[in-house]
Amino acid sequence: MVNEPTWVNWGRTASCRPAAIHRPRGEEQIQELVHQAARAGRRIKAAGSGHSFTAIACTEGELLDLRDHCRVLEVDERNLRVRVESGITIADLADALAEHGLALENQGDVAYQTVSGAVSTGTHGTGERLRNLSSQVCGLTLILPDGEVLSCSAEENPEVFQVARVGLGALGVIGTLTIQCVPAFRLRSLKEPRRLDEVLERFDELCAENDHFEFFWFPHTEIVQAISNNRTDEPARPRSRLREWWDGVLMENHAFGAVQRLGQVREDWLPGLMKLSGRLLGRSERVGPSHRIFANQRLVRFAEMEYAIPRRYAVTAVQELRALFAHSPLRIGFPIEVRTSAADDIPLSPAQGRESAHVAVHVYWRRPWEAYFRQVEAIMDALEGRPHWGKLHFQRASTLRQRYPEWDRFATVRDRLDPERRFANGYLERVLGP
């Protein structure tokens, strides 16, 4: 047991005072801790790296810090599969896979998340032909309130498996995950500044002609950073150490952090600072292993909201946001990110049943975010939006249920696995119901 007064997430948007914080190693220790809490009538939650911006991991009961539950248990090179403990980070998993000539098919740009946290909240990368990370899971184990380990796959407990791939931590503690991988591959990455209208006009074309396409739009400007990543057989062509430091550390973190601090001093400077930031963008190109290209370093803390909307509304959403900035006193100092993903069949996945565009907005962690996020949420509500489960939003079960055709399917499994709600907390009561 770790004697810590509070648990705080990465973005400093959620915190709690658990009765106790434990750092288990191995499924047996998790089983015992879960069973003990259930016998005592206490709730219990698992936490990873704390990169969810909501209070999804918070509890006043027992908290399991899974950072030490992080081993690679088995690599099946023949079937391109890996079995890992749930507390391993995406970065450590990707490095381990690379040693065996394997890779994740797709991943987001934040690699210090735990795999279980990313899976449980429906985290994704970008690519219109590629599904989220949860869809790459082909097996998992759930530790239930009585300490039982329930193995799930398409063949074993298939109904639980179907809903547990985006389980929000509401069904049990994930002990292990088996993930379908692909042979290791390299990506040619091109980052270049473009005009917003050009990108919006060619959005479908750009998504179709690239394996992975996304863009970052600088509010109050017409400037975007367009990022295209494509598979290649070219030899690796990494950035020099100086360029790596200049782009990845100095410009994307330290200089950007300075922009945020200046915006704190004078909010009305932010539009000008966004224009300056956009003008400093240059064209860069490199070739490297996929996991090195996908991942970015994030040293500047922020609060984030993200919505998945039907793909056909992607351009409309950005146009609505542009109109919002033009007609409101909002002054925003963080780029807006736009990505795409393929449809999947997981009941509570934000991309369930539809090709999706993912629109993410951010605010520097020391600045207020609620007014901005509420206005963005109103736009996304009108576009059939579904919030990312690990990012800030104001929805409740009453507003969410109608957005998920298989909502009751999830609820039925939850009632069966955790009827006493040992894995519940305030956030889950709000978004799933009591």
Image (cartoon, helix red, strand yellow):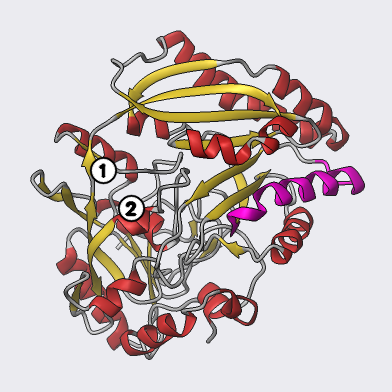
Q: In the picture provided, is 373 more to the left or to the right than 80? A: right
Q: Residue 137 location, x and y as percent?
A: 28, 58
Q: Residue 17 location, x and y as percent?
A: 49, 67
Looking at the image, tell me whether mark 2 or mark 1 is earlier in sequence order: 1
- Residue 192 higher or lower than 146, as above or below: above
Residue beneath the point at 50% across and 22% down: 190
- Residue 328 higher or lower than 205, as above or below: below
Q: In this view of the protein, can residue 178 be seen by the observer?
A: yes
Q: Secondary structure at mark 1?
A: helix
Camera-side residue of 343 and 209: 209
Q: Residues within 10 Å of mark 1 (few under 14, many from 20)?
A: many
Q: Secondary structure at mark 2?
A: helix
Residue 144: which quarter of the image? bottom left
Is the C-beta separation of discs 2 and 1 under 8 Å?
A: yes
| Amino acid residing under circle 2 | Val
The quarter of the rendered structure image containing the N terminus is bottom left
Please provide the residue range marked out in magenta: 309-331
- Numbered circle sitting on residue 115: 2
Q: Which residue is mark 1?
A: 93
Residue beneath the point at 41% across and 83% down: 409
Q: Residues within 10 Å of mark 2 (few under 14, many from 20)?
A: many
Q: Residue 143 location, x and y as percent?
A: 24, 74
Q: In this view of the protein, can residue 255 be seen by the observer?
A: no
